[in-house]
Amino acid sequence: MSDSKTILVLNGPNLNLLGKREPQIYGTQTLSDIEGLCKKTAKPCGLTVDFRQTNSESELIDWIQQSKHAAIIINPAAYTHSSIAIRDSLVQHSCPIVEVHISNIFTRESFRNESVISGISTGVVCGFGANGYMLAIIAVQALLENG
Ligand code: DQA
């Protein structure tokens, strides 16, 4: 899928477990619920969503390299804090890149306080639970429309 009206939404490791994974931190919505929320938010904006999850760093990098989407929204999960390789693949793109975290990584363990992705992201949404994905789509729509 690649066109000027499609947003690539990428989800990293362990996000397939949302709903049962530490619900006190990540809430009770499943990844499939979040996919539905993204699609519902994008539709009235005239946008479509290509929603993917993988536990593999190399698969994320392959998807980023192949992307011809209008924008990339990414929750790199634990790779946020370590993956220079994901950062290097994202930086090849000139489209809007929005980093999303369900939890507020700045109020958690110190090893989560640093993101190697934020420095090359257009913007970061973090700490609003699953609604962060919705906010990221609205931000992308505004960026695509108004720059
Ligand atoms: C996360 C935060 C990361 O620190 C963690 O490793 C995740 C999820 C979030 O969405 O809050 O897997 O990216």
Image: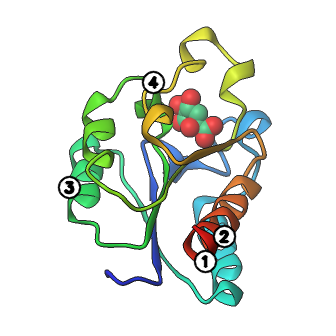
Q: Nearer the viewer, mark 3 or mark 1?
A: 1
Q: Position of residue 105 (x, y in %)?
A: 66, 27
Task: Name the residue that disc number 1 marks.
Answer: 145
Q: CA distance from mark 3 to mark 4?
A: 19 Å
Q: Position of residue 28 (x, y in %)?
A: 75, 51
Q: CA distance from mark 3 to mark 1?
A: 28 Å
Which of pointers 3 and 4 lies earlier in the amino acid sequence?
3
Q: Position of residue 134 (x, y in %)?
A: 71, 64
Q: Is mark 4 within 8 Å of ligand 1?
A: yes
Task: Name the residue that disc number 2 marks.
Answer: 142
Element at label 2: helix
| Residue drawn at the location 64% of the way across and 75% of the way down | 36
Is there any visible trace of residue 100 in the rendered image?
Answer: no
* Ligand 1 rendered quadrant: top right
Q: Nearer the viewer, mark 4 or mark 2?
A: 2
Q: From the viewer's perspective, is residue 113 above or below residue 145?
A: above
